[in-house]
Image: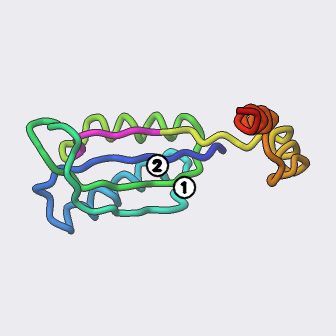
Amino acid sequence: MRSYEVIFILDPALADDGVEAAVVAAKGVLAKAGGEVAEVQKWGKKRLAYDIKKRREGHYVYFRAQAPGKAVAELERHLKIAEPVLKYITVLMEKPRRKAVKAAAVAPASAPAPEAEAVEATLQEA
């Protein structure tokens, strides 16, 4: 199973129990389709960058989940048709590449970049 991050924005008119019901429904859809939610964060009501469906604010909810692709597709379908959901985004989290991790471990962090040495030499000559 792959790791995903899902953020969705709910209608600001919802009370706390309405937000909780929407979160439980989304978790249920994901669980029923074979995924599991590892973390849920309710970020609260925040002002939107631009109006969405004539709303200036929204309740933000963050999920970190482990799920197969079909489960995520089902969750997105649910979020698309759910009445209180204003907007959502799903991001697939990539696994770190072994070569990049190994190269970062080998390269010294305190060594200046060659370009920085050239710039310093130019400044000292002037």
Asked whether 113 or 19 is in front, the reply is 113
Residue 93 vs residue 81: left or right?
Answer: right
Q: Assign the C terminus to one quadrant of the image.
A: top right
For the point 30% across and 54% down, the residue is 60
Numbered circles on residues, count: 2
**Which numbered marker is on residue 117?**
none
For the point 81% across and 39% down, the residue is 100
- Mark 1 and mark 2: Cα distance apart in space: 7 Å
Marks 1,2: beta carbons within 8 A: yes
Asked whether 62 or 120 is in front, the reply is 120
Question: Residue 29's spot in the image, x, y percent?
Answer: 41, 48
For the point 40% across and 38% down, the residue is 89
Asked whether 111 or 44 is in front, the reply is 111
Q: Which residues are magenta?
A: 85-90
Question: Residue 69's spot in the image, x, y percent?
Answer: 56, 35
In which image quadrant can residue 75 be found?
A: top left
**Which numbered marker is on residue 30?**
2
| Helix, strand or loop: magenta stretch | strand
**Which numbered marker is on residue 36?**
1
Residue 2 vs residue 109: left or right?
Answer: left
Residue type at the position of mark 1: Glu
Please identify the residue farthest to the right as the structure is shown: 106
Q: Assign the N terminus to one quadrant of the image.
A: top right
In this picture, is 44 found above or below 95?
below
**Label 1: which secondary element:** strand
Residue 25 lies in magenta, yes or no? no
Please rate how many residues cluster around mark 2, counting C-alpha atoms within 10 Å: few if below 14, some from 14 to 19, many from 20: many
| Labels 1 and 2: the sequence-earlier one | 2
Please rate how many residues cluster around mark 1, counting C-alpha atoms within 10 Å: few if below 14, some from 14 to 19, many from 20: many
Residue 89 lies in magenta, yes or no? yes
**Label 2: which secondary element:** helix
Residue type at the position of mark 2: Leu
